[in-house]
Image: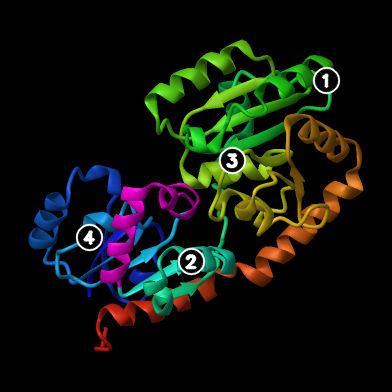
Amino acid sequence: MKFLHLSPGDHLEAAGHVCILRDAFDFESPSDIADLITAENLDAALALHLYRGGRLLQGHHIPFGIIFGGTDLNEDANQGLKNEVMGKVLEEARFAVAFTQSMKEKAQAQWPHATGKIYVQSQGIAATPNPAFNWKEFLQRSEINQSADNLRVFLLICGLRQVKDPLFLVDAFSEWHEEEPGVYLVIVGPEVDPEFTREVKARVKRASGVRLVGEMSQGDLHAAMKNCFALVNSSLSEGMSAAILEAMDLEVPVLARNIPGNAAVVEHEVTGLLFSDPQEFIHLAKRLLHEPELERVLAARGKEYVRRHHAWQVERDTYQSLVRKLAGGAED
């Protein structure tokens, strides 16, 4: 089968399918998708995000599946028009995948007619750091004082948009850096929202101990993660944070904002640390800094959690099985 693939991963190609990967933001309307379907003679499609990607696939008469994003259920479902569109997309979709049972239940409550086609599959993780990555050059590019005593980098990975709330910790962290010059908060990610990006850049420029780095390749990002002291997530909402799971896989401690999506994968003081406000974050970060045994235990338990619950091979098997539904039971 030949797929239009609006989500990441190579599970379909591993099963022998030909995949064309596209970003939903590249298309202005469903007619753009129609042109692509015709030009490439596509047989099926798989989209990440029910609204963002799924609405583009309506009415094209090719079978498709959907992978829910956190934005779908935490934000878009609360907006009347988007909710209606998403419900209609689910009517056409052959299947939909939720990362957690709670996400599935939330979707079923919103769109009861889709109950029988929603499956649960946790995100599979296999972090692969780039061996050629140069940490010293990364620090220099980030204008970080490498001679500072007890240098510790806290890495926050996110697209620059409001729902990721990258500014949540900036003021508190800046005050902490004044006390302990060796601690830095580095924010890494693409500039998704131009207006909000300008606000982030302006705030970071005024904040001591906080740095902003542009988008990085996955291998370099994993290498930076492997070399940092801890991974930070300060989002207002999440479906399932790949960055958190990747950090766990790399045995890097995680400090995450206490929201449902994060609490679904981070158990406080077991596989990571959860905070509700900037002051609690600073308190927990200091604990992690001064309690080496806590750092060691969280890293080890996080690694074990990913091994048990987010196996990459299990995810591959699930998607290869679901894809058969797009073929109507025919041979792949």
Q: Earlier in the sequence, mark 4 or mark 1?
A: 4
**Residue under the point 74% across and 47% down:** 253
Q: Are marks 3 and 2 in contact (CB under 8 Å)?
A: no
**Badge 1 amino acid:** Glu
Disc 2: which residue: 109
Q: Which mark is residue 180?
A: 1
**Badge 2 amino acid:** Ala
Q: Earlier in the sequence, mark 3 or mark 2?
A: 2
Identify the secondary structure beneath mark 3.
loop
Q: Residue 327 vs residue 74: left or right?
A: left
Measured as percent of width and height from the top left, residue 8 is found at 39, 57
**Residue under the point 60% across and 67% down:** 310
**Residue reaching furthest bottom?**
330
Q: Which residues are magenta?
A: 70-93
| Dot 3 alpha-carbon crowd within 10 angstroms: few under 14, some 14 to 19, many 20 or more | many
Q: Earlier in the sequence, mark 4 or mark 2?
A: 4
Measured as percent of width and height from the top left, residue 313 is found at 53, 74
**Badge 4 amino acid:** Leu
Q: Is residue 107 visible?
A: yes
**Badge 3 amino acid:** Ser
Marks 3 and 2, how far apart at CA: 24 Å
Q: Which mark is residue 235?
A: 3
Identify the secondary structure beneath mark 1.
loop
